[in-house]
Amino acid sequence: MIISSLQRLRLGSSLELIGAYLLAIFWIFPLLYAFWAAFHDTQYAVHFELFAPLTLDNFRDVMSQAPFIRYALNTFLVVSFLLPLQLVVSTLAAYAFAKFKFFGSNVAFVLVLVQLMITPEILIVQNYGTLANLGMVDTIAGIGLPYIASAFCIFLLRQTFKSIPKELEDAAQLEGCGTLGLLWRVYVPLAMPTYLAFSLVSLSHHWNNFLWPLIVTNSVETRPLTVGLGIFGAPESGVDWSLISAATLLSVAPLLIAFLLFQKQFVQSFMQAGIK
Amino acid sequence: MKVKSQNVQGWLLFAPAAILLIAFTHYPTIATFINSLFTNSSVIRPSRFSGFESYQNLASDPVFWKVLVNNTWLALGTIPTSIALAIIMALIVNKAIPGRGFLRMAYFTPTMLPMIAVANIWLFFYAPEIGLLDKFLEIFGVESHNWLGDPATVLPSIIVMTIWKEAGFFMIFYLAGLQTISPELEEAAKLEGSSRWNYFWRIQFPLLLPTTLFVFINAFLNSFKLVDHLFVLTKGGPDNASNLILYYIYETAFSFLDISYASALTVVLLIALALAALGQFFFIDKRVHYR
């Protein structure tokens, strides 16, 4: 009796294990196939052959047909100007909400949270008008502008700032720290894990953002990777699967490699951001 | 600190964020509503007040009803399945099993891809005859099918793709939720001779309820916000069978240049999101009660 239930247990858990791996293989398969196709001639993408000759031609063709390096640079410019601004603007706001009882602060905080629901991409019609009035259509800055004030970042930082013990603050004030000194010397250093968490979430979000950049940009000099890929993949350019796979791979490679290298940090950041 | 200096310092610190939020969230929300009540201005005719004419047009626009129905099906098709898969994935990855790192990576990786890239990859899967899905089904003698070209199968095809993209993302939140459950509970359940299934339904699932509500709201928002794949896969076709409200807004505003109508559509979308916001309040309420 005991033996059979033990056997059943072992059988059960090995079945579970097989199920877990099957699911994983099914999940990773589309990406693996794209990876495989990118390094083989189109005919093999359609007629799979395991030992078909490898080639880098697809990547060469993609590069000659579309300026993916320039697109990558644009994406890089967007995230590298956007993220620091997001952090600075949100830090100041979160500090205000965590430490100061200013007039109307509760109402103001609720108004900030509205942006968690109504994200800028919902309001594309009006925001495009605003951007046009500012003369910032088709600029790198225009891609990032609506996202600089991030309700999500303000919220995360406010939660973190509120959890900082009052004693540290008092000690810093005794040492002669002013309002901004306190922020810079006490609050910011203690919130580093939150900054990292938000940064990774923001980075992956804006690296992958499509709709708003599509509307804002209309030239090679500003177009980010996602938009470049979207145009490249358009059926009008003729469907060459290996070529599209290669272009797709080129576009996702930087973020994907960063993710694979710093998997733990990414996963933990997403977790942390979700719990708060 | 004096009240006055608190006021001044607080507002000064908040000012940069406040200005940007007003400019790109609050002002456009209000302006959208106002614009929906006016006709489009053109060179020959200035904009004039038209009341709820745009909304009357909405009510009699079959495409509008079509996109609403599509959005509903998309939400119904993706949310329960991706939540169930996310829970299964989290339960798998939460245990000490061989290759846990690989499994987590495999489940989570699609989340890191832009929707445009996902669409490119799946476009090939769904391609008639040469696509992988058709090749696979050919083994079982199933005839070739134009998955994205057939109004009956286009939305289900997109639903499957969306689940693939999102389940791993939601897994993360369940993983975080599972780690807050005390391991003593599992030991106690084991001692009591409770089955795994029983333990999941009686202990884990109820304790994960706040996570489920959080994920549900996120998934609901995503089902309205994510339309990137339509640009590559179907452009809303065939015959609007895969069109979604945000894509329809985009088309109306930027292809047909009908700002007034696009604004009315946006107001409908905002109302849907407001409903989600109410759900969120309800959820925060719940959480407070639990503690």
Image (tube, rainbow, N blue to C red):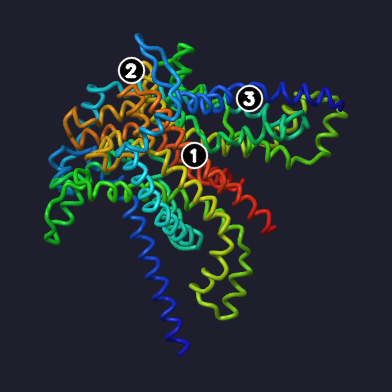
Give x and y (percent) for residue B13.
70, 24
Question: Please, what is the three-letter code of the amino acid marked with disc 2?
Answer: Val
Q: Nearer the viewer, mark 2 or mark 3?
A: 3
Parent chain of label 3 = B
Q: Name the residue nearer the viewer: A62 or B278.
A: B278
Q: Name the residue nearer the viewer: A246 or B206.
A: B206
Give x and y (percent) for residue B129.
13, 47
Q: Nearer the viewer, mark 1 or mark 3?
A: 1
Q: Name the residue nearer the viewer: B70 or B37.
A: B37
Question: Please, what is the three-letter code of the amino acid marked with disc 3?
Answer: Ala
Query: Image quadrant for the N terminus of chain B?
Result: top right
Query: Mark 2 falls on what kind of element?
Result: loop
Say which residue appears at 43% left-offset and 17% top-offset: B48
Mark 2 → mark 3, Cα distance in angstroms: 33 Å
Q: Which circle marks residue B242 in the picture?
A: none
Mark 2 → mark 1, Cα distance in angstroms: 37 Å
Question: What residue sits right under mark 3 in the picture?
Answer: B18
Give x and y (percent) for residue B242.
29, 42
Question: What residue sits right under mark 2 in the picture?
Answer: A220
Q: Name the residue nearer the viewer: B207 or A255.
A: B207
Q: Are marks 1 and 3 in contact (CB under 8 Å)?
A: no
Q: Earlier in the sequence, mark 1 or mark 3?
A: 3
Discs 1, 3: same chain: yes
Disc 3 packing (10 Å; few <14; some 14–19; many ≥20):
many
Q: Which circle marks residue B271 in the picture?
A: 1
Mark 1 → mark 3, Cα distance in angstroms: 23 Å
Query: Image quadrant for the C terminus of chain B?
Result: bottom right
